[in-house]
Amino acid sequence: MKIESSNESVTIEIIDQGVPIPDTLFDDIDEYFEEPSEDVTFLAESGRGLKIIFTMVDEISSEHRNGWNTLRLVKRF
């Protein structure tokens, strides 16, 4: 993990060697996350953290290079 801050923003980079985030995920985030239903039995056990991240940051990007994944999050003040 790498964290940088300035007077204007905070940038967090999370680096791992797991399964890369699909390139198309950031194309239309609203389409990826459907509105919740009252029936919670359909909810997956993973992936919900991405929705939280998308609502909290101003900029998000992902890169896969040489077997390493980097998720970059930027929050501006």
Image (cartoon, grey):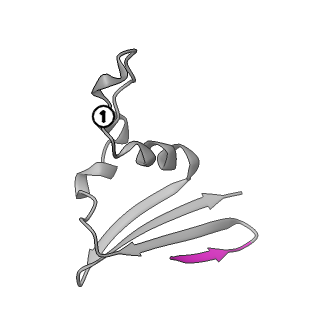
Query: Is-magenta flag for residue 4?
Result: yes
- Closer to the camera, 61 or 38? 38
Image coordinates of residue 11 in percent, x first then y, are 58, 69
Residue 2 sits above or below residue 52 on the image: below
User: Which residue ends up furthest to the right in the rendered image?
Assistant: 7
User: Which residue ends up furthest to the bottom in the rendered image?
Assistant: 66
Q: Residue at x 57, y 48 (%)?
A: 56
Q: Quadrant of residue 41?
A: top left
Neighbour class for label 1 at 10 Å: few (<14), some, many (≥20)? few
Q: Residue at x 28, y 59 (%)?
A: 21
Image: magenta residue range: 1-6
Quadrant of the image containing the C terminus: bottom right
Query: Is-magenta flag for residue 58?
Result: no
Image coordinates of residue 72 in percent, x first then y, are 46, 67
Q: Residue at x 23, y 84 (%)?
A: 66
Q: Quadrant of residue 14?
A: bottom left
Q: How many marks?
A: 1
- Dot 1 falls on a residue whose secondary structure is helix
Residue 70 sits above or below residue 23 on the image: below
| Residue 58 relative to residue 45: left or right | right
Magenta stretch prevailing secondary structure: strand
Q: Amino acid at mark 1?
A: Glu
Image coordinates of residue 58 in percent, x first then y, are 55, 53
- Closer to the camera, 16 or 4? 16
Residue 17 sits above or below residue 58 on the image: below
Q: Which residue is mark 1?
A: 31
- Closer to the camera, 47 or 33? 47
Residue 65 sits above or below residue 9 on the image: below
| Residue 25 relative to residue 72: left or right | left
Q: Residue at x 56, y 52 (%)?
A: 57
